[in-house]
Image (cartoon, grey):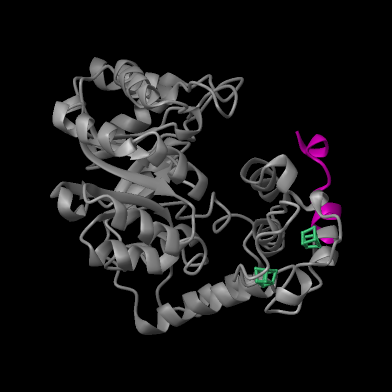
Amino acid sequence: MIYNTLGKTGLEVSRLGFGTMRLPTGSDNSDIDEAEASRMLRYAIENGVNIIDTAYPYHASDLDGDGNSERFLGKFLKENDLREDIILQTKSPLWLIESHEDFGYYLDKQLEKLQTDYIDIYLLHSLTVADWEKVKKLDVFSFLDEALASGKVRHVGFSSHIEVDYVIEIIDEYPKWEVALTQLNYLDEYYQSGVMGTNYLRQVNMGSMIMEPLRGGRLVNNIPDEVQKLWAMSEVERTPVEWALQYLWNRDDVDCVFSGMTSLEQVKDNIRIASTEDLISENDQEIIREVARTYRGFLGNECTRCGYCMPCPHGVDIINCLTEYNIAHMMGDPKASAMQYFTLIDDDSRADSCVECMECIPFCTQMLNIPEELQKVYEYFGSEFDHF
Ligand code: SF4
Ligand code: SF4
């Protein structure tokens, strides 16, 4: 295993982190196959993984619920006497926080679920711009200060899918942040906070942790022939997983990559890759860029996510509606994109909320007929009822 220093925390972390949101399950998502999940975790720890990520809702029976991932992990670490050997990371469920007291209520509940009296890294979970305004009003800073002072939490940070400008603003508003967990893979360099975000984290010496290295598996499944041909042009033979992970580990603004693993086979494969030094040549970097360009060639529209059309007076989340449609075309996995579309975008912000008032059209930098594009999105994804 190869280890990196996690920014100003000073923690030495394995560059592969174990994400526990996709553990093997039985009949439903909350029913973790504990025997198999324990085998996977034990193998990972014995082979050098020393950081594990979980969150309040992981493996809940519904999206906002109280998940079993933390509960299982607490039991596993206790029974195997591994708590001290592990850097444990979990997250505050911001969507459930309605008062200042709620911050402490959920932290205590999570400590209990995890059967521990401290959490190494505590993140504000999936921080959005609206969440940030809400938690500031509820004085999140004094909560974090107290959690650190009491020793219940050793390091604090946030996870987020928002744009880089907001990420920078959030970082600059609280001097005690030490880490952030953001989305990055070779397709998403300029999506969400992307590489500008990880560059900034490095600049301010915060730990840079990465989620979605395989884009939820979409960079490694159903690979188009055009992409296969490009990979074959390299002198080094790599699997799609190796390309995706080594791309990240060749960056000097990435400390730790979390992979949500579902089987022991995946754990073994990821550890093998994480333990191999694989310097990607300039020629192979160009192949990666060409693969990204090829995937982008499958886009459904030309939206660049510049945001000049926003806000829509009728509340349509134009950017994310067009983006999820694009991703669906690019990755050829409509089911996964539908899941994103219906879970990340609120009911009244989806494409069917467009009333065709035309107000956004003059602002589009790509001269798109936005209501027409939104109609395509609506026809493609249909209604939530069609999917779930
Ligand atoms: S045309 Fe649709 S998306 Fe554009 S401003 Fe009007 S309602 Fe919003
Ligand atoms: S202005 Fe046009 S290109 Fe920019 S985000 Fe809106 S739809 Fe996309």
- In the rendered image, residue 312 lying in the magenta stretch gets the answer no
Horizontal placement of 299 versus 247: left or right?
right
Residue at the spot 22% in from the left edge and 30% down from the top edge: 147
Q: In the rendering, at what x and y percent does residue 102 appear?
A: 39, 23
| Majority SS type along the magenta span | helix
Viewer-side residue, 140 vs 77: 140
Q: In the rendering, at what x and y percent does residue 64 appear?
A: 55, 27
- Magenta span: 376-388
The outermost residue toward the front is 137
Q: In the rendering, at what x and y percent does residue 319 appear?
A: 65, 61
Horizontal placement of 37 versus 144: left or right?
right
Above or below: residue 144 compared with residue 240: above
Q: Quadrant of the C terminus?
A: top right
Horizontal placement of 85 versus 61: left or right?
left
Residue at the spot 21% in from the left edge and 52% down from the top edge: 6
Viewer-side residue, 314 vs 378: 314
Viewer-side residue, 230 vs 305: 305
Above or below: residue 89 compared with residue 66: below
Quadrant of res 203: bottom left
- In the rendered image, residue 378 lying in the magenta stretch gets the answer yes
